[in-house]
Amino acid sequence: MSSSGLIFFSLILTWLVNLTIAQNRPEPLYHLCSNTLGNYTANSTYSTNLKQLVSNLSSLEQNDYGFYNISTGQNNDIVNAIALCRGDVRPDACDSCIQNAANQLTGQCPNQKDAFVFYDNCMFRYSNLSMFGIKKSSAVFYMWNRENVTQQDGFNQVLRNLLDNLRNRAASGGSLRKYATANASAPGFKIIFALVQCTPDLSGDDCNNCLIDTISRIPQCCDGKAGGRVIAPSCNFRYEIYRFYDPAAGLESAVPPTPTLSPTVTPPQPPSNARGICFCF
Ligand SMILES: *[C@@H]1O[C@H](CO)[C@@H](O)[C@H](O)[C@H]1NC(C)=O
Ligand SMILES: *[C@@H]1O[C@H](CO)[C@@H](O)[C@H](O)[C@H]1NC(C)=O
Ligand SMILES: *[C@@H]1O[C@H](CO)[C@@H](O)[C@H](O)[C@H]1NC(C)=O
Ligand SMILES: *[C@@H]1O[C@H](CO)[C@@H](O)[C@H](O)[C@H]1NC(C)=O
Ligand SMILES: *[C@@H]1O[C@H](CO)[C@@H](O)[C@H](O)[C@H]1NC(C)=O
Ligand SMILES: *[C@@H]1O[C@H](CO)[C@@H](O)[C@H](O)[C@H]1NC(C)=O
Ligand SMILES: *[C@@H]1O[C@H](CO)[C@@H](O)[C@H](O)[C@H]1NC(C)=O
C-alpha cells in the first residue's frame, strides 16, 4: 500500500474508532456544575458518598418507567440523586445512559456539591439538598433547529395547542411517569411531533407549572423555528417537524386537530449540527 493510501486508511480507522466511542459514550447536550451549595474536597465524606452512589448505579434495580431516586450517606454529607430517562427509552439503554451520565458529570464537576446533566436519552442530578418533589424550572437550556417555518402564525397556533394538550396529559400521569408525545398537522403540509416530560416526583400542579414556565420561553428559544427544546432540571419539552421519539412506547396520543390540510410525508431528519444552543439562566 502507498504511504498516502496508508494515511487515508488510518484516518478512516481513527474516524471509525471515534465514531464507536461517540456511540458508546454519548456527549451530554448540557451540563451545569453549581457551587452555590459549596464545594467538597477530595477524600471528604461527601466525595466518598458520591463515588459510592455512582458506583452503585451499576447494580441499579431496573424498572420500566425509568425514574430513580437515590441517596447515599447521612446528615450534612448526604448525596441525593435523581435520574430520569426519556419515556420511550428501554430499561437497558436507560441504565447505560444513567451510568455514563453520572460518570461524566462527576468528572466535569470535580468538586461542586450540586450538578445536573442532560442527554437525549436521560438526565442525572445530584445535590446535598433534597430535590425529591421540588420543582426547579430555572437554570434552563435551549436548543433550536435552524430551519425557519413558513406560515408562522398557523404553525405557532398548532404548536401551542399541541404542547398545552401534552402538558395536561403529562401532569396527570401519576407518580411513576409524567411523559406524553403526539403529532399534529400544521400549515404547509408539515407535521409537528412533540414530547413533554416532568420528573414524576413532582405533583401534577408542579409539573403543569414547570411546563408552563418552559413553554413560555418559546419566543426566546425557538420563535419561528422548525424545532426546539427547552430543558430545565424538573421538566423539558421538544418539538420537531420529523419524528424523534419512539411511538411504540405506546404513549402517543391523539390530539384534537387544529383544522388544516392533511400532510402526507415526514421530512427527513436534518443534520444534528443544524441547531443553536443557549445557556439561559
Ligand atoms: C468552589 O470552587 C470553585 C472552583 O472550582 C471556586 O471558583 C469557588 O469560589 C469555590 N466556592 C466556594 C464557596 O468555595
Ligand atoms: C486522597 O487520598 C489518597 C489515597 O489515600 C491520597 O493519595 C491523596 O493524596 C488524598 N488527596 C487529598 C487531597 O487529600
Ligand atoms: C426519594 O428520596 C427521598 C430522600 O431520600 C426520600 O425521602 C423519599 O422517600 C424517596 N422517595 C421514593 C419514592 O423513593
Ligand atoms: C450499594 O450497593 C450495595 C449492593 O447492592 C448495597 O449493599 C449498599 O447498601 C449500597 N450502598 C449505598 C450507599 O447505597
Ligand atoms: C449542604 O452543604 C452545605 C455547605 O457545604 C451545608 O451548609 C448544608 O448544611 C448542607 N445541606 C444539607 C441538607 O446537608
Ligand atoms: C432563518 O431566518 C433567520 C432570520 O430571518 C435568518 O438569519 C436565517 O438565515 C434563516 N435560516 C435558514 C436556515 O434559512
Ligand atoms: C400521529 O399520531 C397518531 C396517533 O395519535 C398515529 O396514529 C400516527 O401514525 C402519527 N403520525 C405520524 C406521521 O407519525
Image (cartoon, rainbow, N blue to C red):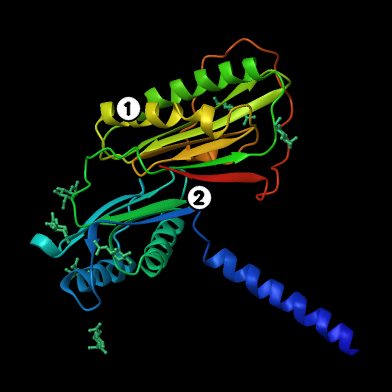
Residue farthest toward the left in the current orientation of the protein = 75
Residue 113 image offset from top left, x and y in percent: 25, 61
Determine the image quadrant of residue 109. Answer: bottom left
Is residue 192 at least partly visible in the picture? yes
Q: How far apart are marks 1 and 2 (CA)?
A: 23 Å
Query: Residue 108: horizontal and vertical position, in percent?
Result: 41, 66
The image quadrant of residue 10 is bottom right
Q: Residue 90 placed where, x, y %?
A: 45, 51
In the picture, the quarter occupied by the N terminus is: bottom right
Is residue 121 toward the left or the right of residue 138 in the image?
right
Residue at 70% from the left image edge and 43% from the top image edge? 270
Give whichever of 263, 74 is nearer the camera: 74
Frontmost residue, 181 versus 153: 153
| Residue 134, placed above or below residue 70 | above
- Say which amino acid is labelled 1: Asn
- Counting residues from the start of the chain, the first of labels 1 and 2 encountered is 2
Kind of residue sitting beneath label 2: Asp
Which residue is the site of mark 2? Answer: 120
264 left or right, relative to 69: right
**Rendered image: mark on residue 173:** none
Q: Mark 1 points at which residue?
A: 209
Near-viewer residue (240 or 280): 280
